[in-house]
Amino acid sequence: MQSNRFQVNNFLVISFLFIIFAGAIYVWVKGDLKYSTIENRELAQMPKMSLKKLASGEYSKEFELYFNDQFPGRLKLIEANATINKDLLGQNVVQDVYVANNGLLLSTVPKQTKESAKVIANRINKFALQASKLGVNTYFSLAPNKSVTFEDQFPSYFPSYGNEASDYLFSYIDPIAHPLDLRITMNKHKNEPNLYPFTDHHWKAKAAFYSYQTIINTIYMNSNEVGKAMNADDFIWKEEGLPFYGSDARKTTRANVTKTDTITVVKSKEKQDLNVCYNAICNRGLYAEEPLKNVSLYTNRYVTYMGGDHPETAIYNDKVKNRKLLIIKDSYANASIQFFVNHYKETRVLDLRYYNKMPIIDYIKKFKIDDVVIMNNVNSIYVTPTLTNFDHPGQGENQ
């Protein structure tokens, strides 16, 4: 009896060691992965050995982290765990994402305070007042994300507070900033398809277009030089690129995904003559093609628009003779910029998380800006204060 137990124990130990060493050999042969798309982070690499690290135990800790990150089939194990939680445990909340019955993955918007809203609004009001003294109108718009537009789908045990946070902010925005509540626009089209991706926290080009129409028609009321908003049939709309799972799916894994997404590519029917410059490098395009072709399902394809976020962008339209626009934004605006450029001879775009050359009022003076549009989504404007730090921009994602 003891002999059999000894043999079983030996078998288990040998099997365990075999799996460990086989995994180590596999990792060594295949090479290290640099980045985990699904986790949106860099993976640990093979640590450098030294006598000091060996003596202190630091090397063994680094190697353990490295081995865990590079373990064979790690992505499959993450997805398998998510499948078990969903199918066996009935889990429909993963991290901060609610898995709705219609296939939408909805990230909850945290509860905010009136005090936080007032701080943000005061910054915007101060900036708009300063700009108005230069003869420049500011138009503050708050892009409603998917979780705001479909907030009614969250269950009572997992609430989201995007509409409340939006209400707080708009209650403190002065008329000088021309506040534009784009929730009104989105609610008119709420039941239309293709407004938002199922698996990503951004919006699609169609929602961005409706918001552009609202903003530009408001600007037109104050300056008819910009012209009225264009119509959807002025463009060719196509779903392009490989299917993908967006940022929300990277949290839940494909185990909770029932529908994949594609990117809406929009082309003007009328030939455009644009010179697009990212960080002073010109002759670029409004679309980046490479993300559309990346074979990884978890690729961030939203960066197709404008090639992602840049500190400073300048777009010149030789077909338009009047006015200069400045857009101050987060990534939500990227899908809408392609529409605004049809109304201005020069459209400048600043992402205040990264741009740090000068106060924005000085920027307006330097480039002789005529109109300013501020466009952020409700979540980012609260959690990223630098988006409204007009006096000292460029202090990172979260200052």
Image (tube, rainbow, N blue to C red):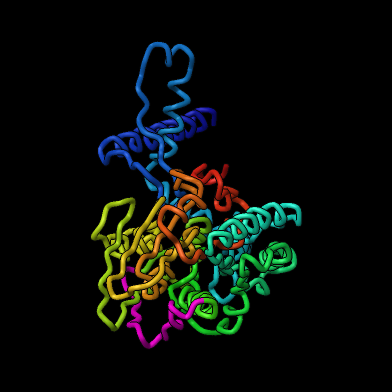
Q: Where is residue 301, by image quadrant?
A: bottom left
Which corner quadrant holds the N terminus? top right
Q: Position of residue 289 (x, y in %)?
A: 27, 64
Q: Is residue 282 left or right of residue 137?
A: left
Residue 392 against residue 262 in the figure, above or below = above
Magenta span has 54?
no
Q: Where is residue 179, by image quadrant?
A: bottom right
Q: Residue at x 60, y 72 (%)?
A: 180
Q: Residue at x 37, y 57 (%)?
A: 313
Which corner quadrant holds the C terminus? top right
- Of residues 11 and 5, the one nearer the viewer is 11
Residue 114 against residue 206 in the figure, above or below = above
Q: Where is residue 177, by image quadrant?
A: bottom right
Q: Residue at x 44, y 70 (%)?
A: 336
- Of residues 88 and 177, the one nearer the viewer is 177
Q: Is residue 115 left or right of residue 273?
A: right
Q: Position of residue 160 (x, y in %)?
A: 68, 64
- Of residues 313 and 236, the one nearer the viewer is 313
Number of numbered discs on residues: 0
Q: Residue at x 59, y 56 (%)?
A: 130
> Is residue 88 at all visible to an observer of this figure?
no
Q: Position of residue 316 (x, y in %)?
A: 31, 65
> Is residue 114 at all visible to an observer of this figure?
yes
Q: Position of residue 14 (x, y in %)?
A: 40, 31
The extreme bottom residue here reads 233
Q: Which residues are magenta?
A: 223-242
